[in-house]
């Protein structure tokens, strides 16, 4: 029996976009981006796909990527397939607004996970780069009654257990959990692999499974948000930078040191 | 609500004492409690919490819940999670506050889900809205590019508060609190995740989180070597040393050096950045610095929007004379 690994992945606006492209529609409490700016797979979720693929590199495994959203850029969301994942399940419904809170998202993902069937391991990114909640995977684990381990930089399986090396603020920690379990991973895991040409070809032939709210046996009421956004705004930063200029760069460096001394900062 | 904990601070403990974040949570909690006209309670669960009871009282808690159980340990977060859940169920708080520490940020989402309520994550400020009588939480989103004000609809309203967002409140030993003991049931089988090994990274320098001065470098340094020059500056100033994620991802410096949203939060008096562009996710970890200094060759770099002093120039030319002048000034 191959290992059954589910990866949770979210489509997000590109977090590295130029600041000028980032705008907030305060009235509707949402972020608007230029239509020319393509969305991306959340970076940490690509790390999650990579973690799953590394397991698959050494033993038989079936990787299913699950994503939830209102609408998808299919070429973007197929990236995990072109990296080597086996199948893609998209939970797509008008009701799945991006502002829907984590708990509701976790409910829908949990319903999908239960519908797909048994699994050994769920891997997700440590947080999504839009709302930075770091909440959905843990809520999914809670709803499914699974043990959870966060911020993994190395994920290994064997003997029905998963061993995770976690990135801690001042070092690392190795923990072990029985499977099934849920693990979140961070960028310290290392660069996700690039899709190969063969992978891209294979991904074009694969069609995602698309499920609506109804397919999941959920109604809108069950997705009532627990957390409501009442305001969304761009914080103001006071810009009063004093530029230190000298005859040349070296002189500016000297003057900067003198300035910091004068200001009693050093 | 005589039996309610009112505003409940779930405090972490370390070696028989309260974690430093507890005093910050109490500052936030007292404000919310005043706004709601409710008492402030602090709860601790651990294997050795006796001494923390008076500590919590001295911070200004009106009620203190202490749960002592030998099987509770920081290596078994699942037990602490269940202890917190049982404390919440028994004390019916209107608001629950947790610190977004390494442990707290994992515990809070599961606790919220276990109680079937929402959670405001990573909050910088929590306030009571006078009209609705509900707590509103302000938190950065989109890597700090935007701020959101969110309200949790259920009860308790739960917020996870970023460390250092609030000043710790001053303890006063003459304060007393009503001490309530709770009995909860835990068993070893609830701890499924087991700690195998903890490897502390060796670091000789000043701790980033508590440093008064921090020097950090970014991708623009181009290789690991220039960080040696920054270490010289850090040595002269008694400063901590850090980096942007780009420098960490490149493998130039260890992950423990990373400052930012997914790295460390620093609040020094002086933060000197070299060849860091100032992406919002980086600023998320350093915007509490009193004075930011930026050296960057790009005058349009975002870092200059938040810096107090800036040099637009090439670090390779700016930094040697900066270092030499510092050396002279400090000798
Ligand atoms: C979810 C998420 C979380 C993140 N968390 C963090 C985090 O915790 N911390 C963090 O730092 N980042 C984080 N990032 C990454 C962040 O978005 C930026 O990519 C990163 O901070 C950029 O690092 P940098 O400023 O070193 O590099 P760059 O943005 O590439 O900037 C390099 C700078 O160096 C300057 N430069 C180049 N050469 C020279 C020279 N010779 N002299 C002077 N200046 C020069 C350039 O002008 C440029 O401004 C996160 C991103 C995401 C999506």
Image: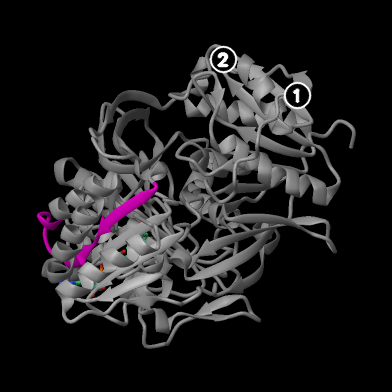
Same subunit, labels 1 and 2: the answer reads yes
- Tell me where residue A228 sits by quadrant: bottom right
Give the farthest residue toward the right: B2
Sequence order check, earlier mark of 1 and 2: 2
Q: Is residue B223 highlighted in magenta? A: yes
Residue drawn 40% across the image and 50% down it: A126
CA distance for labels 1 and 2: 23 Å
Where residue B133 appears, as percent x and y from the top left, is 83, 56
Residue B176 in sight from this viewpoint: yes
Residue drawn 42% across the image and 56% down it: B285
Dot 1: what SS? Answer: loop
Residue A138 as seen in the image, left or right of residue A14: right
Observer-side mark, 1 or 2, equals 1
Q: Report the chain holding disc 2.
A: B
Q: Which residue is mark 2?
A: B48
Residue B14 as seen in the image, left or right of residue B166: left
- Tell me where residue B202 sits by quadrant: top left
Task: Tell me which segment is drawn in magenta.
Answer: B212-226
Q: Which residue is mark 1?
A: B174
């Amino acid at each position: 029996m191959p290992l059954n690994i589910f990866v949770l992945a979210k489509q997000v606006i590109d977090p590295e976009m130029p600041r000028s492209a980032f705008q907030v529609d305060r009235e509707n409490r949402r972020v608007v981006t230029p239509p020319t700016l393509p969305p991306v797979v959340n970076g940490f979720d690509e790390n999650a796909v990579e973690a799953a693929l590394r397991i698959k590199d050494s033993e038989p495994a079936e990787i299913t990527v699950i994503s939830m959203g209102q609408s998808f850029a299919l070429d973007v969301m197929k990236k995990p397939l072109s990296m080597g994942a086996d199948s893609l399940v998209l939970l797509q419904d008008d009701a799945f607004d991006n502002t829907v809170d984590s708990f509701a998202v976790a409910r829908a993902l949990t319903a999908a996970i239960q519908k797909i069937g048994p699994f050994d391991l769920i891997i997700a990114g440590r947080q999504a780069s839009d709302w930075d909640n770091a909440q959905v995977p843990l809520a999914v684990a809670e709803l499914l009654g699974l043990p959870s381990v966060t911020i993994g930089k190395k994920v290994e399986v064997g003997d029905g257990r998963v061993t995770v090396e976690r990135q801690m603020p001042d070092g690392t920690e190795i923990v072990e959990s029985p499977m099934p379990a849920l693990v979140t991973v961070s960028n310290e895991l290392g660069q996700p692999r690039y899709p190969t040409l063969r992978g891209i070809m294979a991904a074009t032939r694969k069609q995602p499974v698309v499920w609506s709210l109804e397919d999941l046996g959920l109604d809108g009421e069950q997705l009532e948000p627990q957390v409501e956004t009442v305001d969304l705004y761009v914080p103001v930063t006071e810009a009063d930078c004093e530029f230190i200029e000298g005859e040349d760069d070296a002189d500016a460096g000297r003057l900067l040191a003198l300035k910091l001394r004068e200001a009693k900062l050093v | 609500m005589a039996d309610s904990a009112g505003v409940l601070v779930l405090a972490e403990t370390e070696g028989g004492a309260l974690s430093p974040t507890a005093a910050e949570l109490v500052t936030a909690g007292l404000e919310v409690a005043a706004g709601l006209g409710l008492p402030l309670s602090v709860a601790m669960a651990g294997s050795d919490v006796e001494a923390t009871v008076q500590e919590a009282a001295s911070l200004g808690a009106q009620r203190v819940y202490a749960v002592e159980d030998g099987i509770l340990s920081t290596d078994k977060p699942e037990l602490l999670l269940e202890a917190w859940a049982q404390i919440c169920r028994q004390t019916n708080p209107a608001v629950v506050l947790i610190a977004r520490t390494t442990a707290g940020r994992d515990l809070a989402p599961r606790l919220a889900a276990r109680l079937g309520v929402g959670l405001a994550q990573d909050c910088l400020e929590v306030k009571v809205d006078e009209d609705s009588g509900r707590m509103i939480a302000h938190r950065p989103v989109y890597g700090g590019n935007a701020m959101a004000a969110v309200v949790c609809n259920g009860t308790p309203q739960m917020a996870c508060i970023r460390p250092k967002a609030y000043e710790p409140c001053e303890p006063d030993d003459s304060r007393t609190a009503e001490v309530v003991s709770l009995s909860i049931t835990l068993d070893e089988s609830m701890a499924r995740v087991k700690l195998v090994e903890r490897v502390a990274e060796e670091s000789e320098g000043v701790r980033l989180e508590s440093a008064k001065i921090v020097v950090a470098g970014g991708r623009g340094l181009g290789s690991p070597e220039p960080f040696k020059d920054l270490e010289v500056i850090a040595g002269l100033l008694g400063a901590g040393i850090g980096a942007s994620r780009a420098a960490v991802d490149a493998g130039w410096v260890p992950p423990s050096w990373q400052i930012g949203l997914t790295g460390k939060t620093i609040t020094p008096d002086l933060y000197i950045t070299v060849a860091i562009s100032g992406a919002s996710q980086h600023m998320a970890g350093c915007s509490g610095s009193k004075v930011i200094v930026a050296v960057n060759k790009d005058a349009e770099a975002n870092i200059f929007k938040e810096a107090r002093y800036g040099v637009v120039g090439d670090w390779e030319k700016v930094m040697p004379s900066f270092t030499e002048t510092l050396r002279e000034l400090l000798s």
